[in-house]
Image (tube, rainbow, N blue to C red):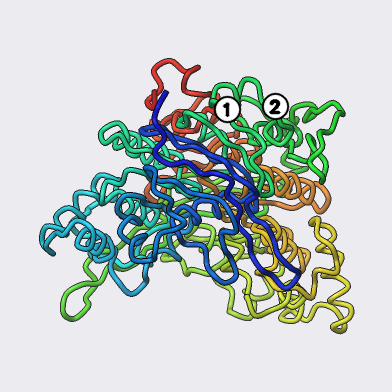
Amino acid sequence: MSENLLSIRNLSVDFETEEGTVRAVKNLNLDIPKGKTVGLVGESGSGKSVTSLAIMGLIPNPPGKISSGEILFKGQNLVDLSNDDMRKIRGNKISMIFQEPMTSLNPVFTVGNQIDEALILHQNMSKSEARKRTIELLDEVGIPNPTERVNSYPHQMSGGQKQRVMIAMAMACEPELLICDEPTTALDVTIQKQVLELMFDLQRKHGMSILFITHDLGVIADIADTVAVMYRGDLVETNSTKEIFVNPQNPYTKGLLACRPRVEYNPRRLLTVSDFMDEDGNEVKAEVHAGPDKEEKVMDESKYPVLLEVNNLKTHFPIKGGVFGRIQGHVKAVDDVSFQVRKGRTLGLVGESGCGKTTLGRTILRLVEATSGSVTYNGTDIMSLSPKEMREMRKKIQIIFQDPYSSLNPRMTIGDIVTEPMVIHNVGKNKKERYQRASELLHRVGLAGNHLSRYPHEFSGGQRQRICIARALALNPEFIICDESVSALDVSVQAQVLNLLLDLQEEFNLTYIFISHDLSVVKYFSDEVGVMNNGKIVEFAKASEIYKNPQQDYTKALLEAIPRGIPKELVEGSVFH
């Protein structure tokens, strides 16, 4: 039996709110053995991240405090340490990879400077030694051209690249315990696989322990030795990874295992945690099933006429350099792309970060101007429209952005956010009528109408994304571009949102372009799939065909990188075994 590197004993963490004291973590007991990986699983609000912040000594006080318990690191109680003593451990012996890299990286310093800082502070390296090691780390985590990108600022990198910078920074001092708080949630499956392999190569090399926090049991299956499941601050189940997957005991664990889309199945609806347990955490005894598989929509050109046609579309961004800022080249974000989307159907666009899928979606809406090519919507050439005409067109075509928090104005109430498109487009006679429509929309997406007076920060991630969907529906659009709209959500909430989007499609005959890096989600949600790489669509086929019979090596690589959701003990030749 392995010796424990870190032991949590009877830990409780409280937060003071206007409504009273909220206990975010309740009497938690958890062990992390030396050289082993413990998976901490649960949805938003379960207490996972608060547990990690408590270990790091980063609970904001006020309003939060550790009200009881011990956190023993190599026998030393971290709760009793002063800030100065804790600073010597934090980032050096215990390191952490945070979930949201954009808020964790300083926007006014280059990524190289930020990694250098940890090496100079904790490893006593000179500036030149630190810079050399930083370039090695960026290369290790898969940043292309690390010698050049070391001088990039965070905003000049894609989401996946920023997360890799965070991983490089956390691993810089070769810590004994690495806490990973949803480190691969926003990454492509291929990059996720590379990053996980990298982490576990380092773990084997240095005997490092890992606490891996996630809502995705599919990822945990590949990597963890032990799994602990949290629900509303309580540890509801803990066991070996194999036992959790083969014989889960708690209804919440059963629900988490069931709600992720699987490539080999295509159910009509995705299961959610509420199919397994009620609001009070009691098991639902009713028979649980997702119903029959979805029927594939037979291509009938009269029933599904072409609504959107894209021909030879190019969007290039100039690369400027030199003393006078002359154009030295171009980034071909979208490079000669052509496709059609038929009314009432869903086109899935899938590919890695930087492949051009988001730029393509924004170019169609003219949020980014095209370099050349044409986009025709229902017979109208979008590229030739004046700004006033384009504004009218946006009544018909809406977008749901990737990050609901940054796309909702924190100073506006939900009522003002949902009614803003109506005000801009003069929909509704007065404020009362608009608010009535907003209340109906919130109800339709599964929220209460009395939420209109609240602000975005009062909602969970899944609820905020539902608000974004309600706003997109405010003008009765015909066509919606979903840009990574479920990628940051818990698997159960993701299942709810995907079910909702499909219900809305059926109810309003909506047409979607669904942009994602998660191939299992795209396969479930889409009728046709376009695989993008380096600005081009390299493969285009029916969703079922692309998974059964992929033609391109790139598509095959994407499919092979999808987490199988099978514990490593049950998989021969697992890279993590």
Tell me residue 430's x, y (percent): 86, 84
Q: Quadrant of residue 250?
A: top right
Quadrant of the frame with the C terminus: top left
Q: Which mark is residue 61?
A: none
Q: Given the image, on which type of amino acid does mark 2 rest?
A: Gln
Residue at horizontal 21%, vertical 68%? Answer: 328
Tell me residue 339's x, y (percent): 54, 48
Mark 2–mark 1 contact, CB under 8 Å? yes
Residue at horizontal 45%, vertical 59%? Answer: 57
Side of 246 where 116 appears, left or right: left
Q: Given the image, on which type of amino acid does mark 1 rest?
A: Asn
Residue placed most toward the observer, 371 or 280: 280
Q: Secondary structure at mark 1?
A: strand
Residue at horizontal 74%, vertical 39%? Answer: 273
225 up-or-down from 474: above or below:
above
Side of 172 where 22 appears, left or right: right
Side of 525 where 288 appears, left or right: right
Tell me residue 364's x, y (percent): 55, 61
Cα distance between the residues tagged 2 and 1: 10 Å
Residue placed most toward the observer, 430 or 197: 197
Q: Quadrant of residue 129?
A: bottom left
Quadrant of the frame with the N terminus: top left
Residue topped by disc 1:
239
Q: Is residue 513 visible?
A: no
Residue topped by disc 2:
249
